Amino acid sequence: MTAKDTIRIGGASGFWGESDMALPQFLAAGGVDYIVFDYLAEITLSIMARARAKDPGEGYAPDFVDFVLKPHLAKIASQGVKIISNAGGMNPRACGAAVEAAISEAGLDLKVAVVTGDDLMARAGELAAAGHVEMFTGAPFPGPASVASINAYLGAAPVAEALRRGADIVITGRGVDSAVTLGACLHAFDWSLQDWDRLAAASLAGHVIECGPQATGGNFTDWEGLADGLLDIGYPIAEISADGSVVITKPAETGGAVTPATVGEQILYEISDPGAYVLPDVVCDFTKVELKQAGKDRVVISGTRGRPAPDHLKVSVTFQDGWRAGSTFFYVGDGAARAARCFAETALARARRKLKAFGAPDYSETLIEVVGDGSAFGESLTRPDAKDVAVKLAVKHADALAAGLILRESIGLALAAPPGLSGFSGNRPKPSPVVRLFSFLLPRDQAQPVVHIGSDMIALESGDGSPVHPGDSPSFEPAAPDQAGTVELPLHRLAWARSGDKGDKANIGVLPRDPALAPWIWAALDEQTLRRRFSHYLEGDVDRYFMPGISAMNIVLHDVLGGGGVASLRNDPQGKAYAQILLQTPVTVPAELAEASS
């Protein structure tokens, strides 16, 4: 590959199940050097682990091979674009073999590399005996027999090594989401692994594009202005230069938009402490990041800083902890919310009566949620006059049959229920495993990345790292606001916001529409207000962080998702709608700023 001052990296996938429209979009536009795909979440790995347990040839994302790559291999080869994907999941070697078979079938000459070393499942007993505890709660290591997956988050170095050895397509298992982007930069620019600021800048670019169109108008607060373009929304492209400068853009003549607001929302997405975004290759500081519009659908990102890599890697364990079962029903008519709750409570009482008759333990957790009466916004905002609602009834139990009893009783109640019950017919739901997440830190030299390319196996050194201390992170607060001449407006008139999850934590980023609004927003969203706003969910602490570069704040709510992921019974187990709840919060601002914002 001829050295270039700037490379263009397209972000084509943010999760397993993402639309397959990005790759043909990038290939049609041309001019992209790398296309990266992110398929993995912790729960995704547990699903893939179960698939591999049933069939040693499974455990990866087969649609990446069959529906994404296969139809476009000829264009990939002719354009010389490099593909980097973590679609290998729990079985990257099998995924690599499937890709090689597709290449051979197409009569092409493309070199495939596979990265392994993240899968520590074979060491479950050893890791349990070592006394590792959960890094957030201090809980003991789960019983090895219940464990579905154990994966260390690897960094970008093995991706770069695979590219240096001539790989056209790189398949990895679990790495940090941004590693596919940073790995391309390490290869293209031959950066030192001690060049912290450049590593952090490329990692932030990777974070922006790792969720695909969330950087170009997807899940955007002001979505109505972009609704006509969502059909053919453009996927993001990061233009990264050898000096570490970054521009975010998208293919011409595609929908959506690239603005400081769309990019800013994505920067704030699921970053926890913005002064210490810890990755295997670098600890990033996003607090002084700045965004600037540099032409239509072009945003410059500057101000990212980096610190030495950590001396430990994060390891995620998924394990089974019983069973859950539930279903959603609809109610229509006067008193719909009351009728829905009566229906759900009666079905639950019937199921519990049968459990008692069988001599079985009670459910370990139950949940009745009504959607449509405003209860998602707290009891003070409920709408008892709602005439159409959905009600979700769910339970957890150590036994699958006991969990499934709630399904039989709720359906069996239909003819005795309050009137107005309806639903979409189809296959009846079944109990599913409760899969919990357990995270811990492992010395980085205990997880060794290996690159497989052809018959060669290249084991990489883990490298040194430095301890990460909470005090290392910079801390900022905006100046106290002047309360004179103020009016009250809902937050959505003053800011953009986006939310997501990290285990049982919700992360809400708030980006002011005008930087001058930041002190008033910070003052309005104090800990007491946030606790009150989420009192019906929140069980843990509240952290607030200020980012003076873009005048944004990042909020972390601990123990707020009912366990998170598929361990939760909630309608929103990943906190995706928490920003919409927060955006209804009243904020007091100066009248002149309110007028300018409107």
Image (spheres, helix red, strand yellow):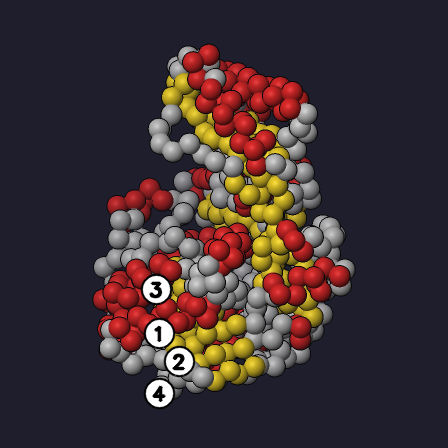
Residue 65: assigned label = 3
The answer to whether marks 4 and 3 mark residues whose Cβ atoms lie closer than 8 Å is no
Asked if the residue under mark 4 is in contact with the one under mark 2, i.e. CB atoms within 8 Å, the reply is no
Residue 577 visible, this angle? yes
Quadrant for the C terminus in the image: top left
> In this rendering, does residue 548 appear at all?
no
Q: Which residue is mark 4?
A: 2
In the shown orientation, is residue 482 left or right of residue 267?
right
- Real-space CA distance between mark 3 and mark 2, rounded to the nearest whole angstrom: 17 Å
Q: Are marks 3 and 2 in contact (CB under 8 Å)?
A: no
- Is disc 3 in contact with disc 1, using a CB cutoff of under 8 Å? no
Mark 1 vs mark 4: which is more N-terminal?
4
Q: CA distance from mark 1 to mark 4?
A: 25 Å
CA gap, disc 1 to disc 2?
Answer: 12 Å
Q: Nearer the viewer, residue 289 or 454?
A: 454
Nearer to us of marks 4 and 3 is 3
Element marked by disc 1:
helix
* Left or right: 532 as drawn, with respect to 71: right
Q: Quadrant of the N terminus?
A: bottom left
Residue sitting nearer the eye, 241 or 55:
55
Q: Nearer the viewer, residue 253 or 432?
A: 432
Name the residue carrying label 1: 100
Badge number at residue 156? none
Type of amino acid under label 1: Glu
Q: Earlier in the sequence, mark 2 or mark 4?
A: 4
Mark 3 vs 2, N-terminal side: 3
Count every numbered label the image shows and give the total: 4
Mark 1: give few (<14), some (14-19) or many (20+) Cα within 10 Å. many
Residue 381 higher or lower than 117, as above or below: above
